């Protein structure tokens, strides 16, 4: 596949008298079979049987983890030979330099036979200086590849290749490693699949690569690390059994000379059309942190270890893996929920072909071992791809949310719940259905805007009472791949805070009851339905930073949602109580100074703030009442309120 970015140019000229062709071109970006090249400049000059070609590139990316910068290529083609010089120089973020200077000659004997010699190849890579033996020779001849004396070394480690590959199974290509540092090999592996460290010694022999590959190996692995997890030291051996027409493979890695971390023993049958894999695999105390690089954005900080007794059979394209996997002292953080869980008992999973069965897997939350969830269900896959899960989680006072607004501006806080949670789907489309009720300690936030300055909040939070601001600042969160469908029974154990103006502290705090339905789709659209009835609470009323009074919210007030959380309706009354003398309002109701004197004594008077209709722009009305039994005082207050 070839793809050119817009802006590519090519121009040239031809002079017939001198038989001269000149071409120049620039390409901002080009991609060839997945390899990207940027800032490409080309100059070609042909005179008779001689062709000069100069190419410079700002960057070449063979894989997503390997790149070459400042590349210069000069080739001269004359008659049947091509002479090439290639150089590059990378300046890395850690100020180290990876650079190379290569000279090669390719001679074409006919269309099927090419002979290549690397006369010079100097590399500075991964803090080592590598050189090539100049006497090497690589020959391509129809269905035959022959390599002679190809040796790379840096003084302390080396890599050698020699031999022949053809349709004759007796021909073999030999690769020999001496104190070879495996760090850096992962840069040549696409998609950052694995990070390797360790020392490799020994040999590998390959044959019949053009038909049914055969391989033999006798390798010693010293201090092998995979994704920064130490697997140990050991051997990887494979031998061809002519009698049985099979390759026997044996691998054993040991950590601290006592723990056999990996043991693989089995056979590969290259002559069979089907069922040519038959392996026994034993894993012992492999640290779970090895999977962290593959779970970014989903899981984090996996700890504990895994052991397994497995059998791998079938075809390489459709292998079947069966056996048991045991987790021990596992601990994992779920990024989306901000929660950390652990296990206090070992749990064993059953692998049945393309299915992993989970039975009575108990997870404890990080705060209290008595708060737990029991998981049952299964995870399926097709040839270790197309993963799907179907899990039932029975939660008991379980911490299922522990986030702040920076992590998720749609909803955040702490939530302890009891009930049933069902998780289905796949990593790209996960559906979470829950029917749960809140427990003590729940402090759940649902902000209705994304303020520029956020303060810490322990309750449900609605921010910014300006409807125009809400129209342009409604929060969006990247929730692609997750669908939430939650039936939430809110109990008085849950605390609620509703903030109208976060900057000045205009807010309602309270506890209550309600049946709410929360829904989030893969586009991040958030809806709510249900009614929350307040049983007790406070309202901090502020006015332009001049007035700040705390009201008590009257029991029975409601907040109701019917879809968008921005369109909630409110119907509640808040009461502000003050002890004050009634003298100023009592003169019309008394007969003299003596009677008026008794109203100088302070009594409790309540200011009523009534809020109705839209929560963000409510209709407000005020009232006054008192608990005094004095009929004249009550009449005076009633008259003022109605006038």
Image: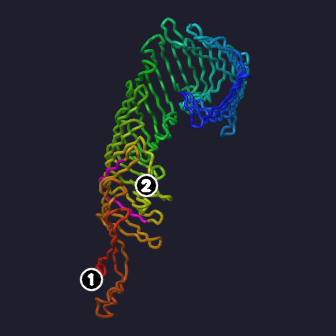
Q: Is residue 216 left or right of residue 557?
A: right
Q: Is residue 507 magenta?
A: yes
- Residue named by callout 1: 635
How crowded is the residue under tag 2: few (<14 C-alpha within 10 Å), some, or many (20+)? some
Q: Nearer the viewer, residue 103 or 41?
A: 41
Q: Nearer the viewer, residue 56 or 282?
A: 56
* Spot occupied by residue 190 in the image (x, y as percentages of width and height): 55, 29
**Res 177 quadrant in image:** top right
Residue lying farthest to the top in this orientation: 243
Q: What segment carries the magenta color? A: 506-519
* Spot occupied by residue 361 in the image (x, y as percentages of width and height): 38, 36
Residue mark closest to the camera, 2 vs 1? 2
Q: Nearer the viewer, residue 402 or 521?
A: 521
Asked which colour scheme the image uses, the reply is: rainbow
Secondary structure of residue under mark 1: helix
Q: Which mark is residue 429?
A: none
**Dominant SS in magenta:** strand
Labels 2 & 1 near each other (Cβ < 8 A): no
Total marks in image: 2
* Spot occupied by residue 371 in the image (x, y as percentages of width and height): 38, 46
- Is 121 above or below relative to 541? above
Quarter of the figure with the C terminus: bottom left
């Amino acid at each position: 596949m070839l793809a050119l970015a817009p802006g590519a140019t090519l121009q040239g000229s031809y002079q017939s008298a001198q038989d001269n062709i000149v071409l120049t071109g620039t390409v901002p970006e080009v991609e060839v079979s997945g390899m990207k090249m940027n800032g490409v400049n080309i100059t070609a000059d042909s005179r008779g049987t001689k062709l000069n070609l100069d190419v410079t590139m700002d960057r070449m990316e063979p894989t997503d983890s390997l790149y070459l910068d400042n590349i210069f290529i000069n080739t001269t083609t004359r008659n049947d030979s091509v002479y090439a010089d290639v150089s590059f120089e990378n300046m890395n973020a850690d100020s180290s330099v990876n650079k190379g200077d290569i000279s090669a000659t390719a001679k074409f004997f006919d269309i099927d036979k090419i002979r290549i010699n690397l006369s010079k190849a100097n590399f500075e890579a991964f803090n080592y200086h590598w050189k090539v033996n100049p006497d090497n020779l690589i020959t391509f001849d129809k269905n035959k590849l022959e390599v002679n004396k190809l040796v790379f070394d840096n003084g302390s480690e080396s890599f050698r290749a020699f031999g022949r590959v053809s349709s004759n199974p007796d021909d073999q290509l030999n690769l020999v490693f001496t104190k070879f540092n495996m760090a850096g090999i992962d840069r040549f592996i696409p998609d950052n699949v694995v990070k390797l460290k360790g020392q490799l010694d020994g040999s590998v022999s390959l044959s019949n690569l053009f038909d049914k590959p055969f391989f033999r190996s006798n390798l010693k692995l010293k201090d092998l690390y995979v994704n920064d997890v130490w697997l140990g030291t050991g051997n990887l051996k494979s031998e061809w059994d002519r009698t049985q027409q099979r390759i026997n493979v044996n691998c054993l890695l040991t950590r601290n000379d006592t723990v056999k971390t990996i043991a693989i023993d089995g056979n590969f049958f290259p002559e069979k059309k089907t069922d040519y894999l038959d392996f026994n695999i034993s894993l012992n105390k492999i640290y779970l942190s090895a999977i962290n690089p593959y779970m970014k954005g989903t899981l984090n900080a996996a700890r504990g270890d895994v052991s397994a007794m497995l059998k791998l059979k079938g075809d390489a394209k459709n292998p079947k893996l069966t056996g048991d996997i045991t987790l021990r002292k596992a601990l994992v953080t779920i990024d989306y929920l901000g929660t950390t869980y652990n296990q206090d008992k070992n749990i064993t999973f059953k692998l049945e072909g393309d299915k992993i069965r989970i039975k009575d897997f108990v997870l404890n939350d990080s705060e209290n071992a008595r708060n737990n969830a029991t998981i049952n269900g299964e995870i399926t896959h097709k040839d270790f791809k197309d993963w799907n899960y179907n899990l039932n989680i029975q939660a008991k006072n379980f911490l299922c949310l522990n986030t702040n607004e920076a992590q998720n501006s749609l909803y955040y806080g702490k939530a302890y719940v009891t009930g049933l949670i069902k998780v289905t789907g796949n990593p790209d489309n996960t559906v979470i259905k829950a029917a749960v009720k809140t427990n003590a300690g729940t402090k759940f936030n649902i902000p209705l805007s994304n303020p520029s300055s956020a303060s810490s909040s322990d309750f449900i939070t609605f921010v910014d009472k300006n409807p125009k601001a809400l129209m342009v600042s409604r929060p969006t969160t990247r929730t692609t791949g997750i669908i939430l469908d939650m039936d939430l029974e809110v109990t008085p154990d849950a605390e609620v805070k509703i903030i109208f103006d976060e900057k000045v502290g205009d807010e309602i705090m309270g506890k209550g009851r309600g049946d709410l339905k929360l829904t989030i789709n893969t586009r991040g659209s958030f809806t709510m339905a249900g009614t929350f009835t307040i049983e007790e609470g406070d309202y901090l009323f502020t006015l332009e930073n001049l007035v700040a009074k705390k009201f008590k919210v009257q029991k029975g007030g409601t907040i109701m949602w019917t879809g968008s959380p921005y369109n909630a309706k409110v119907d509640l009354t808040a009461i502000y109580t003050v002890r004050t003398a009634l003298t100023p309002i009592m003169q019309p109701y008394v007969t003299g100074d003596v009677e008026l004197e008794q109203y100088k004594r302070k009594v409790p008077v309540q200011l009523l703030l009534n809020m109705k209709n839209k929560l963000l722009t409510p209709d407000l009305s005020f009232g006054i009442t008192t608990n005094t039994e004095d009929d004249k005082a009550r009449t005076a207050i009633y008259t003022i309120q109605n006038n």
